[in-house]
Image (spheres, rainbow, N blue to C red):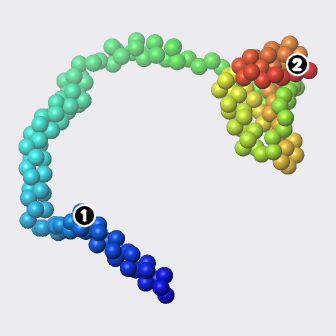
Amino acid sequence: MFRILGFILGSAVSIAAIFMVLGVPEIRLPSAEADQARFDAALQKIREKQPAVEEVVDTVEEVAVPTEAAIESVSDEALMPMTADLVDEMAIEPMTEPQDIYNPEQYWHEFWNPFRSEIAARGFVSQLEKVTGLDYRVMKVEAGVYQVGFAYSDDDERRFKISQISAATGLDLPQT
């Protein structure tokens, strides 16, 4: 009981001391007249700027909207050579057969300790891709085991990529 009484008395003394040092704050409620004056001033500024905006809109319309005379002056014969050139430039090569995602001549080299979460493995891969510019994959070995690896075709390419990773990251990776 005395603790509660002491807390209340101490709080009251503290608030009184703050009022004595800083003074009683003046509270001004907004008046309708002040709000109306600010609204009128803002409305006046908008009205003053409206002619300038209309001039800009007229200028943009003159530039953006071609007249019928300008449209009629360009004949179809004048456009034909241009469209023929564009068609030649845009000629599409015949489609080739899509490559299979699985390439039997490609192997995967796992070069780092397995990760316990896919998020950690993907974070590691994203940092490696930024540093080395190589393409990596995250492979799920089993539940809670994710391995990071890269594709290679032959042993020379595998060694080259390992040395490139080592040089870019400072990691000491075995060549085997």
- Quadrant containing the C terminus is top right
Separation (CA) of disc 1 from disc 2: 76 Å
Is disc 1 placed on a helix, strand or loop?
helix
Res 169 quadrant in image: top right
Residue 95 appears left or right of 14:
right
- Can residue 12 be seen in the rendering of this structure? yes
Look at label 1 and name its amino acid. Answer: Val
Q: Is residue 97 above or below residue 32?
A: above
Q: Earlier in the sequence, mark 1 or mark 2?
A: 1
Q: Position of residue 20 (x, y in %)?
A: 24, 68
Classed neighbour count for the residue bearing mark 2: other residues with Cα under 10 Å, few (<14), some (14–19), many (≥20): few
Q: Please identify the residue farthest to the right as the structure is shown.
A: 176
Q: Position of residue 44 (x, y in %)?
A: 8, 50
Residue 159 appears left or right of 83:
right
Residue in view at x 10 percent, y 46 percent: 45
Q: Is residue 39 above or below residue 99?
A: below
Residue topped by disc 2: 175
Residue in view at x 21 percent, y 66 percent: 23
Nearest to the observer: residue 92 or residue 17: 17
* Marking on residue 21: 1
